[in-house]
Image (tube, rainbow, N blue to C red):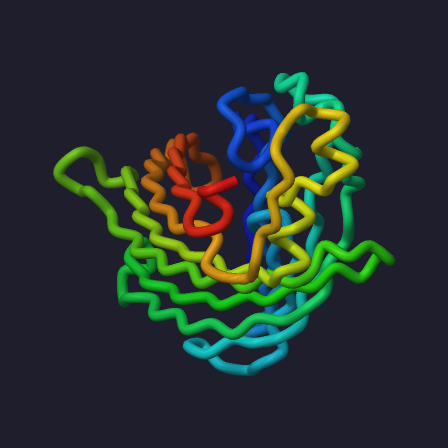
Amino acid sequence: LQGFVTVGVGLIPDYEGSRSYQAIPYLDGRLRVKNYYARFEGGALRFNVIDSATFHAGPLLGFRRGRGDVASKAITRMHHISGSMTAGGFVEYEHVHHDPRAAERLTLTIGDDVTGGDSGWQATLVGIVRRPLSFVDQGFIASFEADMSWSSRSYMQTYFGVTPADAIRSGLPVYSAGAGFKSAGAALAFNQYLSRDWSVGIGLHYAHLMNDAAKS
């Protein structure tokens, strides 16, 4: 039985596309038994049901943030979006080197709203490369990530569209958003191990909105 848990604080936009930020709790973790595992990452809980050290797949449960009272007065006057639960699945390729501090991982996740709303589905592809930087310190590890998301029309219209009623309340123009690539991002993280069991770290993730999300 192996695993880890990471707790901290994250600073994120108060809604997708916002220039204002808010602090939220940060949680990440994994519990592994042989090649099977449960992992909470990026707001989703994944269950690997494949007995392989390299290829993983299984179901996932996730959570999407809603949008209500935010820094933008115009957005606040629009109809509020409730948080929602998602369900779906994932496939993953992971290569861990002889030195387990070094690894590569490619993960595709797909999740759909299952709580009665109509915020649609989204697919996200994430690639991560992790390497120790021994010239800095034996316990210093750097990770680089690249990601891209595709969203359905329902998702795009929910989070980036402006209905006629919302336009009247907010003063924004009516806008209809279609399906397509929503965003592309990159992340860089550094982790310093203090012992075999404890470490501290920091990470920065940049996401660039694309297509109809950017036009919104």
**126 or 2: nearer the eye?**
126
User: In the rendered picture of this protein, how many numbered marks are placed on residues?
Assistant: 0
In percent of width and height, residue 123 lies at 54, 64
In percent of width and height, residue 157 lies at 65, 51
Give the left or right position of residue 94, taking residue 129 as reference. right
**Quarter location, residue 190:** top left
Vertical comparison of 134 with 9: above or below: below
Identify the image quadrant of the N terminus. bottom right
**206 or 141: nearer the eye?**
206
Give the left or right position of residue 12, taking residue 100 as reference. right
**138 or 5: nearer the eye?**
5
Q: In percent of the image, x 28 and y 38: which residue is there?
A: 140
Give the left or right position of residue 21, taking residue 127 as reference. right
In this view, the residue farthest toward the left is 135
**210 or 128: nearer the eye?**
210
Q: In percent of the image, x 51 and y 34: which residue is there?
A: 17
In percent of width and height, residue 112 lies at 70, 64
Q: In percent of the image, x 28 and y 57: which residue is there?
A: 102
In percent of width and height, residue 125 lies at 44, 63
Give the left or right position of residue 188, taking residue 134 as reference. right
In this view, the residue farthest toward the right is 116
Q: In percent of the image, x 86 and y 58: which residue is there?
A: 116
**Quarter location, residue 171:** top right
Vertical comparison of 191 with 113: above or below: above
Vertical comparison of 167 with 179: above or below: above
